[in-house]
Image (spheres, helix red, strand yellow):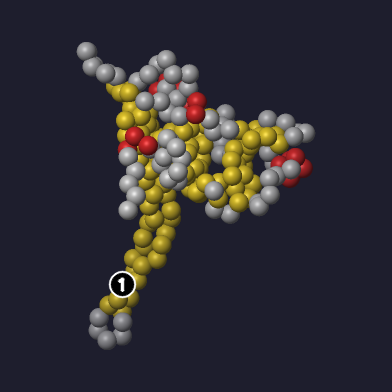
Amino acid sequence: MATIASNQLAIYAVDSGLTAAMIIIDQSTEPTTSEVTAAGVANNEKFLWVDGGTFKGVYSSDGSAVSETTIATTDLLAAATSTTLDASIAVNEISARNGSGGATNYIASGVFSWNFSLDGLVDLTAASGSPVTLLDMTRDKKYVVVKFVTDVNDGSNNVEYAGQALVESCSVTGGVDDIATYSATFRGFGELYKLA
């Protein structure tokens, strides 16, 4: 059995710059400029490329070329002390008479939902990923692309999940002679993709 140390979990966030969800292009080959335009992506607007349930990346187009927006180490949400990925399916239960005076329960899967959350230490010197960045994304109601990574060290046991989200809540807390902390929750929008 493989175990994952908690210090090898990480959440990255890329600001889409949009107050609406990004367009998703779902196809097996990297989208061309004409395909991006046909999908309704505006010039210099970010979009997601997925292949079925596999996340391929965040891209943008300037009308003449399509380029990938790298989810870089600078997008790591800094000084996180705990990270969580929650995924759930609503289970719908129905009881029906079974014809012999009793009842049988049936279940069916409902809506899939997911969210990321993290707690961390405030590091205002971080170029990005600081609580100030998160508060600004929350205030501006911007969609972000979040990526949950299980192994940030050597990548040998790496599993990654990504999707679009809104910052549902963000708080910064501090007391006298205390270490300032922050927490944030990202509410998932649409599918949660596994990275290839």
**Label 1: how many residues lie within 10 Å, few (<14), some (14-19) or many (20+)?**
few
Q: In this view, does 180 lie above or below 47?
A: above
Residue at x-position 48% and y-position 22% = 128
Residue at x-position 42% and y-position 49% = 113
Q: In this view, does 48 lie above or below 167?
A: below
- Residue nearest the observer in this picture, 150 or 133: 150
What amino acid does circle 1 point to? Asn
Q: Relative to 150, is 181 on the left or the right?
A: left
Q: x%, y% of residue 67? A: 68, 34
Q: x%, y% of residue 96? A: 33, 76
Q: Can residue 72 be seen in this view?
A: yes
Q: Is residue 189 visible?
A: no
Q: Quadrant of residue 179?
A: top left
Residue that label 1 marks:
105
Residue at x-position 50% and y-position 42% = 163
Q: x%, y% of residue 27? A: 65, 51
Q: In this view, does 100 lie above or below 79?
A: below
- Number of marks: 1
Q: In this view, does 102 lie above or below 173?
A: below
Q: Quadrant of residue 45?
A: top right
Residue at x-position 56% and y-position 36% = 20
Farthest bottom residue in view: 100
